[in-house]
Amino acid sequence: MLGKGVVGGGGGTKAPKPSFVSYVRPEEIHTNEKEVTEKEVTLHLLPGEQLLCEASTVLKYVQEDSCQHGVYGRLVCTDFKIAFLGDDESALDNDETQFKNKVIGENDITLHCVDQIYGVFDEKKKTLFGQLKKYPEKLIIHCKDLRVFQFCLRYTKEEEVKRIVSGIIHHTQAPKLLKRLFLFSYATAAQNNTVTDPKNHTVMFDTLKDWCWELERTKGNMKYKAVSVNEGYKVCESITQWLASKRSSINRRKKEKPHLYLEGDLRQFGLPAYFVVPTPLPEENVQRFQGHGIPIWCWSCHNGSALLKMSALPKEQDDGILQIQKSFLDGIYKTIHRPPYEVVKTEDLSSNFLSLQEIQTAYSKFKQLFLIDNSTEFWDTDIKWFSLLESSSWLDIIRRCLKKAIEITECMEAQNMNVLLLEENASDLCCLISSLVQLMMDPHCRTRIGFQSLIQKEWVMGGHCFLDRCNHLRQNDKEEVPVFLLFLDCVWQLVHQHPPAFEFTETYLTVLSDSLYIPIFSTFFFNSPHQKDTNMGREGQDTQSKPLNLLTVWDWSVQFEPKAQTLLKNPLYVEKPKLDKGQRKGMRFKHQRQLSLPLTQSKSSPKRGFFREETDHLIKNLLGKRISKLINSSDELQDNFREFYDSWHSKSTDYHGLLLPHIEGPEIKVWAQRYLRWIPEAQILGGGQVATMSKLLEMMEEVQSLQEKIDERHHSQQAPQAEGPCLLRNSARLSSLFPFALLQRHSSKPVLPTSGWKALGDEDDLAKREDEFVDLGDV
């Protein structure tokens, strides 16, 4: 311990004042062990991964209470990750309770996961970018999964410091070409070793058969049809030619690398090869404006209502073009809106809802609450944490998204109306809201396979620009918006409030969010299906080379062993009871969600019809002439929403029917497992959700054991015992943030005094108080 006193310890004992002053730095104590450590640890490379630069005698800081000590080792940078190779014994124990990722280790950071890089110069922290004239003595890396790494370079050779710092900055912050992503190097090197999971039955929606299956499952085939007009990306190819003809108008900077900007422009044309449109719609209409202005089917309710989305038409200034677009939209609305049988409700998400800038600004403030460099910083901000949380507006944005989804659910479920979502490119907020609506209304989407298929349909095939929104190429920071992470946070609110309704756990959602930055899976690394499919072949002189077989994130066996995968499945999930043949014959089919419907009367459609009264306003809106209010902002809608919302929550929950979240202030919570898992001070040892889950699993195993004994009396052979999540044992030894945090990382006492605690008394007074007054581990 250094000369500064620390209040710490446990068991209710008072911490004695320090009587020993050490003039030896903590890192110097480990100097004798350094040479042995570096010889024992080896770097494990994935297929196609290459070592770029490295530095030895690097000290990785480990935070414990107020004392910083570290582990010596090597800091390396490859074309896939930044890795620290330190002393194995000083890291986490190699016991069976660890939740290990086979691709990313505890001390590994993928290049795409790096958020910000800081250097410490004479105790001053500065952001690092570009070419450096002076190199730091300490390197701090903030990650997008909210980990914080601190490396001391004070005892590293100067040339190695220059090499490793420059390499990390260049390979994490410099703009990249799509073909230079590690995704392609890995796929090429592992081409013969790629094995897909035979148990993965996720519907990928990359064939016409998949869309027909979804239409049949939701009974949408009565009014909608799957089309192949864009098969081979014929529509997209015509857009590529148009963009190429505009190359001469690109400014000088863009002319130097026109392929970068043309590729970026193509992101807005995200039509998949196959999709679904209303049956009366002529397929040739799809090609008129490259898929814009076409209502695309998302999902059908069993009562006949459907959820649709549509991207806005290109904005043109020529009056002749405006007239053509207006005539085109008139024909579209006549096709989809035929009162009194087909009534369409519109939701313009571009002008009447959140903006992408609001989402990005809120998350930028929000994530700073969790990027903690040391425990002193944690306790300094703890006293004002809730006010900082509120000022970020992130939880309010989650609430607004859930509220909008409930409003749309009310229109479809209670009023039996079709809903058309409008957005500029229909690839951001349309994906988010349509996915939430289906999650609330369709119990199939709450199974793991159903949820993965939902993401494939609405996000991957729906053309969400993962490449730009995650900023994988580091070409435009303004395009980086965590829309998909916002969706996962909204899903977590539902999972947290209604655990038995979901087959997957919050751990599943957490590792799914981490997978956004692992460039060996193709799922989250393209802007559109067209971009993915046109880049799957290898370029070069070898024309006989086969197309690349890219992995999907749904092959969980690539990341986790079978034992670890059990933590992704919810053991408390209530499966839907299966009816025998006799029961099916004796009852008329009635979908389960009707059992939880509020008793609201469906409204009759207006006599004059939607087309005459509202089409002109919508056309103006789609053409860029925004109007201040649409019909969905009326007081009447608010009354319907409140009646629908209150009535549903007054009834008992049907986990296989309609599912609505609570959206009142206290009900929207922070997703602790994802955001707090790397902060030792935020852990509750032996408590939290993990303790409750452990007790429930023990009871389930006891019931299962008794059931097996009963079965033995009726069968000659004993029934095989189902494998349970055996990682959950001895909850007292675990943390509330299990499986991502273990006991070795905890720091149960605050650093006292801090600036926020000085008002409570001086250090001597605080040290004399009982532990219960200063133990703030339960955040």
Image: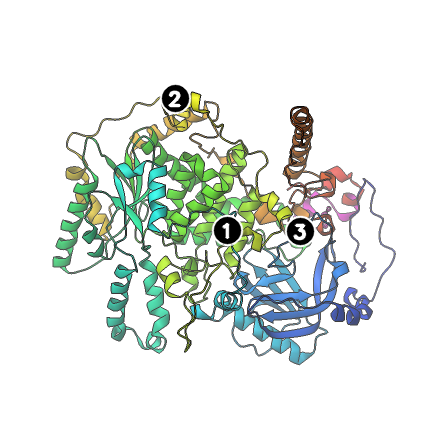
| Residue sitting nearer the eye, 248 or 638 | 248
Distance from the alpha carbon under mark 1 to that under mark 2? 38 Å
Q: Give the range drawn in magenta.
A: 748-765
Helix, strand, or loop for circle 1?
A: loop
Magenta portion: prevailing SS class? loop
Give how far across and how far down residue 615 sits, in percent.
18, 42
> Nearest the camera: 504 or 19?
504
Residue 652 versus residue 280 in the image, above or below: above
Residue pictured at 78% horizontal, 40% vertical: 769
What residue occupies the far bottom of the structure in this picture? 159
Which numbered disc, 3 or 2, marks the residue that appears first in the sequence? 2
630 inside magenta stretch? no
Q: Is residue 463 visible?
A: yes
As measured in the structure, the alpha-carbon distance from the residue carrying label 3 to the one carrying label 1 is 47 Å
Calculate the distance from the C-alpha at mark 3 to the C-alpha at mark 2: 72 Å
Amino acid type at image mark 1? Trp
Residue at the limit of the structure toward the front, as seen here: 716
Q: Is residue 113 left or right of residue 74?
A: left
Question: Which of disc 2 and disc 1 is earlier in sequence?
Answer: 1
Please give the name of the residue rendered at 35% of the width and 47% of the height, measured from the top-left corner. Answer: 209
